[in-house]
Image (spheres, coloured by chain):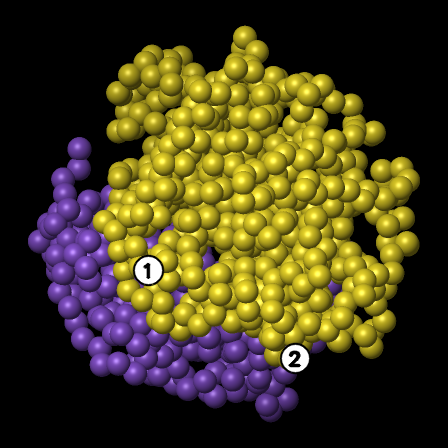
Chain colours: A purple, B yellow
Amino acid sequence: MTESMNIKLKVWRQAGPKAQGRFETYTVPDANPHMSFLELLDVLNEQLIKSDQDPVEFDHDCREGICGSCGVVVDGVAHGPQRRTACCQLHMRHYKDGDTIVVEPWRAEAFPIIKDLVVDRSAFDRIIAAGGYISINAGAAQDANSLPIAKTAAELAMDFAACIGCGACVAACPNASASLFTAAKISHLAMLPQGAPERKSRVTAMVNQMAEEGFGDCSNHAECEAVCPKGISISTIATMRREYMKAVLG
Amino acid sequence: MKPVLDSHIPDGPLKEKWGNYKNGIKLVNPANKRKHTVLVVGTGLAGGSAASTLAELGYNVKSFCIQDSPRRAHSIAAQGGINAAKNYPNDGDTVWRLFYDTVKGGDYRSREANVHRLAEISNEIIDQCVAQGVPFAREYGGLLDNRSFGGAQVSRTFYARGQTGQQLLLGAYQSMSRQIGLGNIEMFARQEMLDLVLVDGKARGIITRNLITGEIERHAGDAVLLCTGGYGNVYYLSTNAKNSNVTAAWRCHKRGATFANPCFTQIHPTCIPVSGDYQSKLTLMSESLRNDGRVWVPKKQGDNRKPKDIPEEERDYYLERRYPSFGNLVPRDVASRNAKYACDEGKGVGETKLAVFLDFAEAISRLGQEAIAARYGNLFEMYERITGENPYETPMRIYPAVHYTMGGLWVDYELQSNVPGLFVLGEANFSDHGANRLGASALMQGLADGYFVIPYTLGNYLASNDLPKVTIQDEAFATAQTESTAQIEKLLSIQGTKTVTEYHRELGRIMWDHVGMSRTEEGLQTAIKEITALREDFWENVLVPGENSTLNKNLEFAGRLADFLELGELMARDALERAESCGGHFREEYQSEEGEAMRNDDLFTYVAAWAYSENGHTLVKEPLEYESVKLTTRSYK
């Protein structure tokens, strides 16, 4: 059978958006290597509730790395040490008995803290609402096979469309830029013939919205790509810039 | 008083019903559409597609979700694909065949007319999604690729790697976002529906809780669309997301909407096995893996050798052996039950012995690792992240887990519940999958309901009914709000000793042991007794921390668990009442000598719809009439 581990957690606690936050230290004496990182937080919360303390709030839902709800900074790295892995799929086998783990929320002006590790990412929704779509009403589509799309283009579009909107890219960026998120959607739709008619209006509207939300600019640190749980490439940001230049100049 | 359930199936031959229906309905004039407010609860495939489509038509839409963004609804986690009768592969598919496979797959417990409409609409869905930019898999010639799924002998499943649900949901979300940007949809994220408000017997509003501030809000409209998904989390451990729940549907049920076939749950055969007591949820491995993976267990009981050390002749590929024509692609209920039998016989594998192998060695040697990686790469990675084992080198260990609920609120052909103005879409309704859903059909149904059914049926309702203006000052809103507030205060005031999670785990254990993959009269009676006792204890002794006026996940979970504790009992009662085995509902008393399910069409060819009253539930039966399909024993041999 697997041995249990004693894990110390330093967790950011903040009662509300305006409240003063601080780190609190807790010990989970019976962590198990097969547990996920969020299950470790579950165990901690059960401990806290039983000892009459408020549990740590964190966003989570599917717990299989696809809904994009969860996201915390683990020891200074968005989603933690395992590459291409959202923290719901980070497992405790990557830690050892006696380890201390520091847990913080995403930190960015455009993602205000709601409580503890929960932040407000609605700015992402507003970027998509500004132009991250193809305007097609239900019922108006032609036959699905009427426009052939090269397999390579479809595969690339899928690579970009894989973004789960978790916000790790923003949390990792020294400028708190949302460039990777925005560029992934622009690149996805730019790969496809269906996206062509709105190509120019889309990129300008989305880039403008991104700036309006208070996200910083991209200065090519590539921290976003390093933490992206879906491995979205920063080449999308180059695509976004090219698309933007073509839109404003051409 | 028992409600009367009229399915409102249109006249005419099966193939003409949907056309006849559309020809006969009343329409809402374009200028009048904006005068109607429609409340859409839930933003998954059904809710997202309904909200965007209704907004495109000009209705004034208010949309609600419990997550921080509509993009996170649990449809996003669907992996394998979406069915359609396009017949691009030229392998013999037709609308009829998709209809027939779905009715047969559902073990003849669904409504013919609804399922035929679903099959008819299936092709339009693919067109719509491609036009939205959904990056489906393609062939080298640039046309769309298809793959096979369980329960069918044609390839009719469209897919976007192992993330089909994500891509379809993002398509719907983007369409919704466009309407939000245009001001046609008002979006309320992090809002949970707590009650349905009826005025003059019609659904005219909802009560919601703002999950950040705890404030209770009132919203009025001309119709309510419930698109809130399934109730698999009644088992605690399931493949559903942690926030998936039955609360919105259950509270509508308590306001008069009948709940149909609650015992029909789908246990998915290929999930990652449970590893310990702390387990918070289970992870699905897509059914598409059964295209290339072979399921087996050692022939010998308690064989502890590593899989690679077990020679070919000492392995039992039990699905291929028992079901030679469908092999590893038998429907989900059949595959799950057979995995359970293998483990019950002591042939299970892994540390807990509650698992069977899903082996890709043969496919890898035939097609090469690269081809397998292209098909399932992300699923293999996910498996390795969770288990620490590499499925390219050693077989996956899998075991069945609760995945989907075929039961749900009763709806007629128009997707309207027996409460006028309350429509139920997607997994939240009961209508299309009978006693067992085929793979890649949930996405099809969710989108069919939202993009192509509700725009017609809702319009007909709005145009045919006199709907005087209702405001949130109406007394019905005040009453419902008071009741919601009282429950929250009660939950917080108990301050007992057991946490919400502890109660939920206990409920899950009862449900899995007695209302799970195989059920008996005795077990179901035990379940009813245990759930009743647990529910009473919950209301005496639950410990909900914190307060109402802030983000408080435990309080949310407590309210949802209170409803699961009532639903669980009804599921057991429904399972007890249905003294036959069909689809996902397997009663041990009703099986053949070979262990196959035995339906009883003479007694049970009906929808079991349960009506709620303070004194308990009453059963209302909607007889199922099969005019086009002959009921036969479902065979996949």
Disc 2 sits on a residue from what chain? Answer: B
Q: Nearer the viewer, mark 2 or mark 1?
A: 1
Q: Is residue B374 above or below residue B170?
A: above
**Relative to B516, is B52 on the left or the right?**
right
Q: Is residue A214 above or below residue A7?
A: below
Q: Quadrant of residue B581?
A: top right
**Camera-nearest residue between B64 and A69:** B64
Place of residue A87 in the rendered image (x, y in percent of width and height, measured from the top left) = 31, 58
Amino acid type at image mark 2: Leu
Q: Residues within 10 Å of mark 1 (few under 14, many from 20)?
A: some
Disc 2 target residue: B182
Residue displayed at 54% across by 49% down: B250
Question: Can residue A24 be seen from the camera position used here?
Answer: yes
**Camera-nearest residue between A48 and A246:** A48
Using the numbered discs, state the Cα–Cα distance from disc 2 to disc 1 in whole angstroms.
41 Å
Residue displayed at 76% across by 50% down: B414
Amino acid type at image mark 1: Leu
Q: Quadrant of residue B530?
A: top left
Residue displayed at 62% across by 41% down: B611
Q: Which mark is residue B602?
A: none
Disc 1 sits on a residue from what chain? Answer: B
Place of residue B233 in the rendered image (x, y in percent of width and height, measured from the top left) = 44, 45
Disc 1 target residue: B492
Place of residue A61 in the rendered image (x, y in percent of width and height, measured from the top left) = 41, 56
Residue displayed at 64% across by 38% down: B609
Which residue of the protein is positioned furthest toward the left in this rendering? A98
Place of residue A247 in the rendered image (x, y in percent of width and height, measured from the top left) = 61, 86
